[in-house]
Amino acid sequence: MHLPMYFFLRHLSVVELLYTADIVPRTLADLASPHPQAISFQGCAAQMYIFIVLGISECCLLTAMAYDRYAAICRPLHYSILMSRRACVAMVSISWLMGIITATTHSSLIFTLPFPRHPIIPHFLCDILPVLRLASAGKHRSEISVMTATVVFIMVPFSLIVTSYVRILGAILAMASTQSRRKVFSTCSSHLLVVCLFFGTTSITYIQPQAGSSVTTNRILSLFYTVVTPMLNPIIYTLRN
């Protein structure tokens, strides 16, 4: 349980536990009530801040876990050095730090914009894009910030994960034994499935052209990466273990 894989899994579990705790209780309370209570301006800002911190941290953690699999399979003789305790702590710390920096920047830009007196968010959470669309003016600066963060914290981590798995695939194909190939692939299957679930829905939500995006589609996709994926991840890793 002290292996780097389980070290990252513990932090991923904390992220997803907080992720759902930030969103699901409020959503369930609104669904159960015939007269849902309006969320305050400060409450919406707090929910978005926590949402961004945890979302960016998860992107970085999944990237670190892909690098861990790459080091274990492609550079096994250097694994203990590449994935030392200090290196793992540094990766996790950077993941949380990137989340905090991004959340602080985005929240400051978005919640200093002018909003209508009683805005209604067409969503079940205070997500970035639905809230940003409600602003009366000055949205251009924040939209540029959102797109920049999307490229940096979704496309760059995803590209690094793909690069790691391309290297891993090359190492698997170079193995002579079919049993060895199957064993190595099984160590990556859980992480690969989680990556596809998380990055697949988030990339469609934040990278698709906003002119052709549907509110209902965005709600469904948001439901996947905020509720469904965190619910499935423990099952996926439990079956693997």
Image (tube, grey):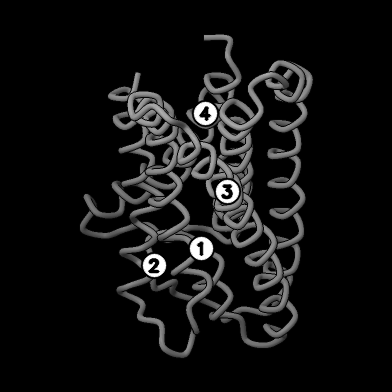
Looking at the picture, how far across and down is residue 29, in whole percent? Answer: 30, 47
List the residue tagged with mark 4. Answer: 14
Q: Amino acid at mark 4?
A: Val
Marked residue nearer the N-terminal end (2 or 3)? 2
Residue at 74 percent of width and 18 percent of height: 84
Q: Amino acid at mark 2?
A: His
To which quarter of the image does residue 54 belong?
Answer: top right
User: Residue placed farthest to the front in the image?
Assistant: 176
Judged from the image, the secondary structure of the residue bearing numbered disc 2 is loop
- Label 1 vs label 3, nearer the camera: 3
Alpha-carbon span between mark 2 and mark 3: 30 Å
Q: Say whether marks 2 and 3 touch (CB < 8 Å).
A: no
Q: Residues within 10 Å of mark 1 (few under 14, many from 20)?
A: many
- Label 4 vs label 2, nearer the camera: 4
Q: Amino acid at mark 3?
A: Ile
List the residue tagged with mark 1. Answer: 127
Q: Say whether marks 4 and 1 touch (CB < 8 Å).
A: no
Alpha-carbon span between mark 1 and mark 3: 25 Å
Residue closest to the eye, 14 or 121? 14
Residue at 36 percent of width and 35 percent of height: 233
Q: Residues within 10 Å of mark 4 (few under 14, many from 20)?
A: few
List the residue tagged with mark 2. Answer: 123
Q: Amino acid at mark 1?
A: Asp
Alpha-carbon span between mark 3 and mark 4: 21 Å
Judged from the image, the secondary structure of the residue bearing numbered disc 3 is helix
Q: Say whether marks 4 and 2 touch (CB < 8 Å).
A: no
Residue 237's place in the image compared with 98, above or below, is above
Q: Say whether marks 1 and 3 touch (CB < 8 Å).
A: no
Q: Residues within 10 Å of mark 2 (few under 14, many from 20)?
A: some
Alpha-carbon span between mark 1 and mark 2: 8 Å
